[in-house]
Amino acid sequence: MNATAVPKSRARNWLEGVTLSAIFQGLPTFAGAVLLLKLVGAHEIVGEPFGAAIFVALASLFHALVMPSLGPRFPKFFKNYEPHFFDASLSFDEKLAQWRAQPKTSLQLVTEVTMLSLLAVAVVSVG
């Protein structure tokens, strides 16, 4: 059976890339930042109702919106830019699979899990 791939629209590809960047790169980074702010007692963001959640959501979204334009231009400064997330020839699942198959991804995920775990324990311990 000959199946021809339907070309993916530019908007859909962009949305997939932004979604993956926000969830897998922005969210852990800014969740860690919020835990650090809570740990040091900076109540400007974490002291307000839903302040931490709003900060994490907006910062992750901003990060994901900026990465497709600045990541390829300045790879030295934006080392977490993932070109697979914005590859129009890949499906959503293939983008995630290609990203997970890279050795640096495993190291990144282990580092983030360890950091977030330690920060969460510290925040709960301090009160």
Image (tube, helix red, strand yellow):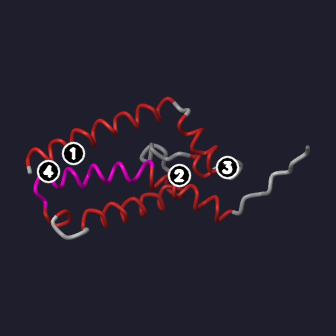
Percent from the top left, x then y, of residue 16?
58, 57
Q: Of the residues under marks 3 and 1, which one precedes in the sequence?
A: 3
- Separation of marks 3 and 2 at Cα, in angstroms: 24 Å
Does 120 sit left or right of 24 as displayed?
left
- Amino acid type assigned to the residue bearing label 4 in the image: Leu
**Crowd tier of the residue under label 1, counting other residues whose Cα lies within 10 Å: few below 14, some 14–19, many 20 or above:** some
Q: Quadrant of residue 84?
A: top right
Percent from the top left, x then y, of residue 100?
53, 37
* Residue of label 2: 73
Does 125 sit left or right of 120 as displayed?
left
Between marks 4 and 1 in the image, the one whose residue lies nearer the viewer? 1
* Residue of label 4: 39
Does dot 3 land on a helix, a strand or a loop? loop
* Residue of label 3: 91
Q: CB under 8 Å between callouts 3 and 2?
A: no
Percent from the top left, x then y, of residue 30?
32, 54
Residue found 72% across the figure and 58% down from its top: 8
Does 3 sit left or right of 92 as displayed?
right
* Residue of label 1: 120
Q: Of the residues under marks 1 and 2, which one precedes in the sequence?
A: 2
Magenta stretch, residue numbers? 24-42
Does 55 sit left or right of 104 as displayed?
left
Residue 123, placed above or below residue 101: below
Q: Of the residues under marks 3 and 2, which one precedes in the sequence?
A: 2
